[in-house]
Image (tube, helix red, strand yellow):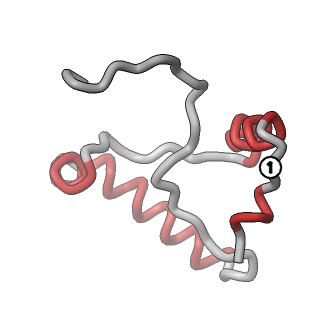
């Protein structure tokens, strides 16, 4: 940020999500989620996540976490459906 000067900061927004399609097997989804959470807790997993993605782990999200995105789109007069193909 030496050359870029922020002019404003927004609320936190979700990013780099791991998302499953609506009809994905709930059992398989749970297994994958648990495997990723377990991986992120191990020292080797922490190292991989830090080196590859510059992250410290995973956080479970829920629909409410996306309210800030909906509010921002509404403020801008935009609809999320515009961006979904």
Q: Between 28 and 52, which is closer to the camera in this rendering?
A: 52
- Residue 9: x, y in percent? 52, 20
Q: Between 38 and 62, which is closer to the camera in this rendering?
A: 62
Residue at image position (57%, 47%) is 60
User: Which quarter of the image is occupied by the N terminus?
Assistant: top left
**In the picture, residue 75 is in which quadrant?**
top right
Figure check: 82 above or below 47: below
User: Which quarter of the image is occupied by the C terminus?
Assistant: bottom right
Name the residue carrying label 1: 78
Figure check: 79 above or below 21: above
**Left or right: where 62 falls relative to 34:** right
* Disc 1, SS: loop
- Residue 63: x, y in percent? 75, 48
**Left or right: where 22 falls relative to 56:** right
- Residue 54: x, y in percent? 25, 45
Residue at image position (64%, 76%) is 27
Residue at image position (74%, 75%) is 22
Q: Between 70 and 41, which is closer to the camera in this rendering?
A: 70
**In the picture, residue 11 is in which quadrant?**
top right
Q: How many marks?
A: 1
**In the picture, residue 48 is in which quadrant?**
bottom left
Residue at image position (76%, 57%) is 80
Give the class, few, some or many, for how many residues have Cα within 10 Å of label 1's Cα (few <14, many ≥20).
few
């Amino acid at each position: 940020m030496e050359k870029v000067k922020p002019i404003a900061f927004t609320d936190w927004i979700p990013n780099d999500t791991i998302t499953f399609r609506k009809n994905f097997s709930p059992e398989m989804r749970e297994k994958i989620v648990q495997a990723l959470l377990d991986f992120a807790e191990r020292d080797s997993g922490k190292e991989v996540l830090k080196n590859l993605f510059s992250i410290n782990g995973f956080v479970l999200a829920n629909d409410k976490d996306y309210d800030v995105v909906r509010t921002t789109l509404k403020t801008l007069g935009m609809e999320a459906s515009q961006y979904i193909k």
